[in-house]
Structure formats: C-alpha cells, structure tokens
Image: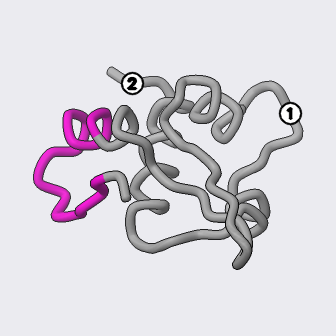
Amino acid sequence: MPDGVEILILDLLEWLSHRNRSYEETMDAWRTSGPKLPVWEDANERGLVCIEYSDAGSSVRVTAAGSELLKQSRPGNGLSCAPR
C-alpha cells in the first residue's frame, strides 16, 4: 500500500497530466515547506517531473518515468500523460 507522500506524488503527476502548468503555478500548488510532505521535492528527485524553459516561460511536465508510474499505479484513469 502506498504511503501518503506516494499518493500525493501520484496526485501531482495526474494534475500535471491534465494540461501544461507553469513552474510558478506548480510551486503555488505543490511546494511544501516542511519535511513531512515533500511531494514536489520527491517527484523532482526521482525524475518523475521536469521543468522546461522557453522564451514563453517555464513549463512543468511529467517525464516518461512519471508517466509509467502513473500508468502502473492508476490504470484506466483515462488520462494521457505521454511525455511531450
């Protein structure tokens, strides 16, 4: 059974898979200041998300590893989270 942080990481991946999110939007929603729920930090360290920068700004995306984890953990969720 996944622990609380693992479930929240899956929630983050699912949230990101719905549409493009800026880094600022992602940090507003997911950055934590305490050590008990390091959702963004863990997802980033595990290579499940990445930040892409362009002239238009930043975009946080689910990586191939994040897509695979989401697919395995939440099959049939109807989301397409293939890496762009």
* Amino acid type, callout 2: Pro
- Residue sitting at 51 percent across and 71 percent down? 20
Identify the residue under disc 2. 2
Judge whether residue 77 is colored magenta: yes
- Percent x, y of residue 6: 48, 30
Residue 14 is tagged as none
Q: Amino acid at mark 1?
A: Gly
Q: Residue 69, located in which quarter of the rendered image?
A: top left
Label 2–label 1 contact, CB within 8 A: no
Residue 72 percent coordinates (x, y): 20, 34
Q: Secondary structure at mark 2?
A: loop
The image's colouring method is one colour
Mark 1, secondary structure of its residue: loop
Residue at the image position 70 percent from the left and 78 percent from the top: 56
Range of residues picked out in magenta: 68-82
Nearest the eye: 7 or 48:
48
Q: Which residue is mark 1?
A: 34
| Magenta run includes residue 56 | no
Q: Position of residue 37 (x, y in %)?
A: 70, 33
